[in-house]
């Protein structure tokens, strides 16, 4: 495999991972919202996912925060424009902010125009 093919594959798979992480977080947020007020829904998630209670709480908070407070960030993750680490950093930095201030920060980040096209499987888009 040529280096460019490896890089194309890495870029493609990273985008796919980001997409699936966003879908996972959306599903988790939807479930948490649907179960709001139910006493043991987080324990059900913990058991189903084989997570510790602390990790479950953290993941639910991240999912809810991205879905409700930082939806453009979750969209960017889903599109493969950012990875989960970057989404998590923005979530952590905006955690103490009100929803309005978090939206201002998010709006300053998204949408940003890319200065170069994203490499997709099969090479660079035509005309780049």
Image (cartoon, helix red, strand yellow):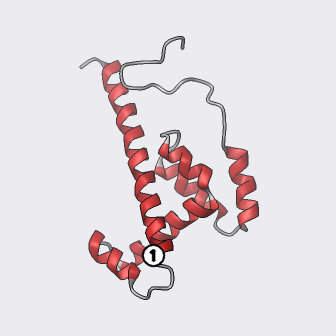
Residue 23 location in percent, x, y? 42, 53
Residue 62 location in percent, x, y? 51, 65
- Quadrant containing the N terminus is top left
Vertical arrangement, residue 119 with respect to residue 78, above or below: above
Question: Mark 1: few, some, or many residues within 10 Å (few <14, many ≥20)?
Answer: some
Q: List the single residue furthest toward the bottom.
A: 39
Residue at 50% across, 85% down: 37
Q: Does 106 sit left or right of 81 as displayed?
A: right
Vertical arrangement, residue 9 with respect to residue 72, above or below: above
Which type of secondary structure does the marked residue at label 1 adopt? Answer: helix
**Is residue 59 at least partly visible in the picture?**
no
Residue designated by label 1: 57
- Quadrant containing the C terminus is top right
**Is residue 55 at least partly visible in the picture?**
yes
Vertical arrangement, residue 27 with respect to residue 126, above or below: below
Q: List the single residue furthest toward the top.
A: 127
Residue 75 location in percent, x, y? 55, 47
Q: Does 107 sit left or right of 7 as displayed?
A: right
User: For residue 90, what is the image quadrant?
Assistant: bottom right
């Amino acid at each position: 495999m040529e280096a460019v093919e490896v890089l194309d594959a890495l870029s493609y798979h990273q985008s796919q991972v980001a997409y699936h992480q966003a879908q996972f977080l959306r599903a988790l947020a939807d479930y948490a919202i649907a179960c709001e007020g139910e006493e043991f829904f987080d324990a059900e998630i913990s058991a189903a996912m084989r997570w510790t209670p602390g990790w479950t709480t953290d993941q639910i908070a991240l999912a809810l925060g991205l879905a409700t407070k930082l939806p453009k960030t979750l969209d960017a993750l889903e599109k493969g424009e950012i990875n989960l680490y970057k989404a998590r950093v923005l979530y952590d930095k905006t955690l103490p902010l009100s929803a309005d201030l978090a939206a201002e920060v998010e709006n300053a980040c998204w949408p940003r125009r890319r200065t170069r096209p994203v490499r997709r499987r099969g090479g660079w888009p035509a005309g780049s």
